[in-house]
Image (cartoon, rainbow, N blue to C red):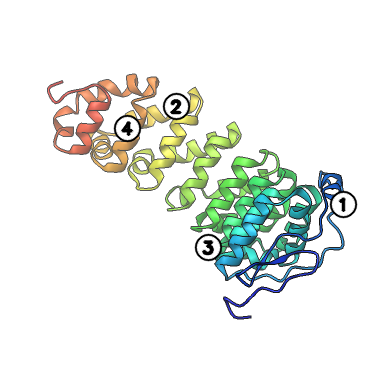
Amino acid sequence: MAIGAPFPCVEGLGVHVKGKGRFCPKLAGVDEESRLSDGGAPGEAPCAHVPALEVFPEDPEWAQQMVRQLEDGSRLERRRLVAGLAGASLRLALSKHGTSVIQKALEVAAGPDRQALVAPLHGSVAELYRSRFGNFALTKLIEAMPASSCDFVIHGLRGGALAAAKHKFGCRVVERLISHCPQAQVLGLSEELLTSVEVLAESAYGNFVLQQLLEHGASQQRWHIVQVLLRKLPHYASHRYASHVVQKAAVWSDIEGQQAMLAALLSADDAGLIAVASCQSGSAVLEELADIDLFRKGLHGRLVALVPALTTSDAGKQVLASFGLTQTS
C-alpha cells in the first residue's frame, strides 16, 4: 500500500478517522464494564482472540496515531492494540517511525502482553543493536521490563560483547544491561568485557561501557579496571577517550584504588606529569581529582614545583587554579 493511502479498518481494533480517511487505532464496541473487568496484571493470560494489525511503519502519521492511542486509550484498548502489534514487533522496531510505536507499547504493556510483544525479538539482538532505530527499542525493552526478562538480550550478546560495546549503537544496549540488571545476571557479560579493558578504554564508544562497569560493577571488577589503568596511567589520563574512564575510576574506587592511582601519578617524572596537565584530556582528569581530598593533598606539592612549566599552557593554568595555585606559587 502506498504511503498516504487510507488505512484499512481492522474489525474489532479500530475505526477510520472522520474526514481523513485514515485508520485510527481506537477500539470500537468496548463498553465500560469490559474495560473495568479487564486486567493485564502479571500472571494473567495475554489478551486473546485479537487479529494481527496491519502495520505501516514507514508512515509517520500512522505511527503518531498509534502512539497517541497507546497513551490515551483505556486499559483494554491498549491491551488489544499491543496484542495486534505483537506479530510485527521486529519489523516495527527496525523502522524509522515504527520504533516509536514499539517503544510506547513496551511502556504501556504489562505482564503477558509485554512478553508476547517481545517474543518476536528473540534471536535478533545483534540485528537490533546494529540498527539506528532498533537499538532504541532494545534499550527501552531493558528499561521497561523486569531484569529477569532481559536474559535473551544477554544471551544474544554472548561471545560478541566486545563488538557490541565498541559499536556506536550497541554500546547503549550494553550500558543499559549493566546499569539495570543485577550484577549476578550480567556477570558473564561483564567478565567477557573485562578481558579487553585496554581496548575499551581507548574506544570512542567502549569507554562508556567501562564507565558503567566502574559505577555499577562489583568491587573486584572495579579493582581489575584500575589495575589495568595503573600500567600506563599518565597515558590513559591524557587519552581522548580513556581519560573519561580514569576520571570515573578515581570517583568510584575505594581508598585502596585511589591510593594506587595517586602513587602511579606521583611516580611519573616531571615531563610526564607536565604532559598530562598540559593537554585538554589530562587537564580535565586533574581538575576532577582536585575535588577528591586524597588527590588534592597528594598532588599539591608536586604541582607547586611545576608551576613555571604549567603556566605556559591554558590547560596547565586551569589545573593550577583547580588546586588553588597561582602563577607565582
Mark closer to the chain start, 3 or 1: 1
Mark 1 crowd level (few <14, some 14–19, many ≥20, 10 Å Cα): few
- Residue 43 appearing in the image: no
Q: Which residue is mark 4?
A: 286
In the image, what residue type sits under mark 2?
Gln
- Secondary structure under tag 3 reads loop
Q: Which residue is mark 1?
A: 45
Vertical relation: 321 (above or below) 125: above
Q: Nearer the viewer, mark 2 or mark 3?
A: 3
Where residue 258 is drawn, which disc sits there? 2
Report the residue at 33% width, 28% height from top.
266
- Secondary structure under tag 4 reads helix
Q: Residue furthest bottom?
A: 1
How far apart, in angstroms, are the residues tagged by discs 2 and 3?
A: 38 Å
Vertical relation: 95 (above or below) 172: below
Q: In the figure, is residue 230 to the left or right of 278?
A: right
